[in-house]
Amino acid sequence: MYRIKCFSLVFAFVLALPCFSQADSVSEKGKNWKVKLNTSWVHEDNLIGTPTNGTARPAGIVGTSPDADGFNWDLTADYKYKFNDKINFKLNYDLDQTYYGNNSAYDVTTQFFGVGMTRKINPLTNFQLDYKYIYNIVDRDDFSGIHYVNPAFNHMHAKYGLTRIDYLYKYTDNWKFDSRDTTQNSIGLTQYVFFSNFKRRVSLGYRFAKDDATGFLAFSRKIHDFKFSIKSPIAYGVNLNAKTKFSIRDYTNRPTEVGGVAGRNDYVQNYSIKLDKSLLKHWKCLNDLVAEASYRHNFNNSNELVRNHKNNIFQLGLTAKF
């Protein structure tokens, strides 16, 4: 019943967006709502997390093959209300579903609800406050609910680009595994540098996070994230978006593993590259139709051998923007 109510409210919100855009708000130029729909084919070569150095699977892993082909679709809707020249508010919703066919135990449905406020301090500086709630369903069963509170300070420098400093509070309520409930506090710093009249950019970021488990203390950990990304047009209307992230995860209260390994330390590497090209612009209610192809590599290098695994993910799809 809860899911039905959520879907009903969501689709009512999406259908009402054009009406909202006519409200007596202090609107910016153009419409103050956006809708985006993405569909894509997905292939993962190690969906079930088979360890790199052995054939044994972690407890709870199911499926007959680590390879999986799937279908993903994602609907996002945003509405922005400009209260005055200094303050604006934003509502957003995202519905994301992935189906894996023969590995249906990993089918995921995620609903994302968000509300945010931006307070302009001066033309180059602002303060943002966002609240987000994520509702996850795995294999058609309620899995987890996640609350985010994220205040951030942004400053644009004429020479050095945009500096963003933010604090994040996250509470994860795992309905499926209560022992994995966690509270996270983190702080991050990201620097964006722009080139070619903002057509190209690079970014460099660092975040420190501390997860405190409210159930099983072994899931408490400290996290160091280092990120780097590039976004740029390349040729023939094709755009490149490349990212890399390196994470150090120290499980401070992990019990000694069988075999004498004390604690658990993970070194996580993520690499991704996405190419996209616009196929059709400004046709009736369609603003843009974009073809996308992406590749992502995840490598979790852990001293707990059962958690030491790699995964390669390929996606090919279309995005329609309204």
Image (cartoon, grey):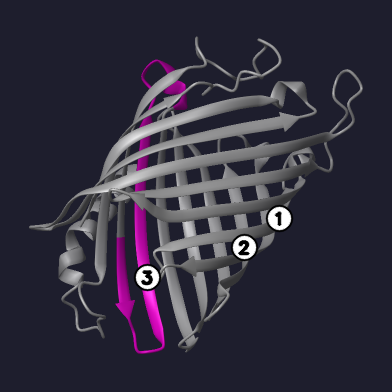
Q: Which residue is mark 1?
A: 209
Q: Are marks 2 and 1 in contact (CB under 8 Å)?
A: yes
Q: Is residue 88 part of the magenta span, yes or no?
A: yes
Q: Residue at x 70, y 25 (%)?
A: 308
Q: Nearer the viewer, residue 1 or 275?
A: 275
Looking at the rendered structure, the secondary structure element under dot 2 is: strand
Q: Is residue 275 left or right of residue 164?
A: left
Task: Report the Cα–Cα distance between label 3 and label 1.
Answer: 26 Å
Q: N-terminal of the two: label 2 or label 3?
A: 3
Q: Which residue is mark 2?
A: 168
Q: N-terminal of the two: label 3 or label 1?
A: 3
Residue 278 coordinates in the image, percent (x, y): 24, 50
Q: Residue 51, located in which quarter of the rendered image?
A: top right
**For the residue carrying disc 1, how many other residues have a C-alpha within 10 Å: few (<14), some (14-19), or many (20+)?**
some
Residue lying furthest right in this view?
260
Disc 3 residue type (three-letter): Lys
Q: Residue at x 78, y 26 (%)?
A: 304
Q: Which residue is mark 3?
A: 90
Screen quadrant of the C terminus: bottom left
Disc 2 residue type (three-letter): Leu
Q: Is residue 96 left or right of residue 226?
A: left
**For the residue carrying disc 2, how many other residues have a C-alpha within 10 Å: few (<14), some (14-19), or many (20+)?**
some
Residue 192 coordinates in the image, percent (x, y): 54, 66
Magenta segment boundaries in residue numbering: 78-106
Task: Report the Cα–Cα distance between label 2 and label 1.
Answer: 9 Å
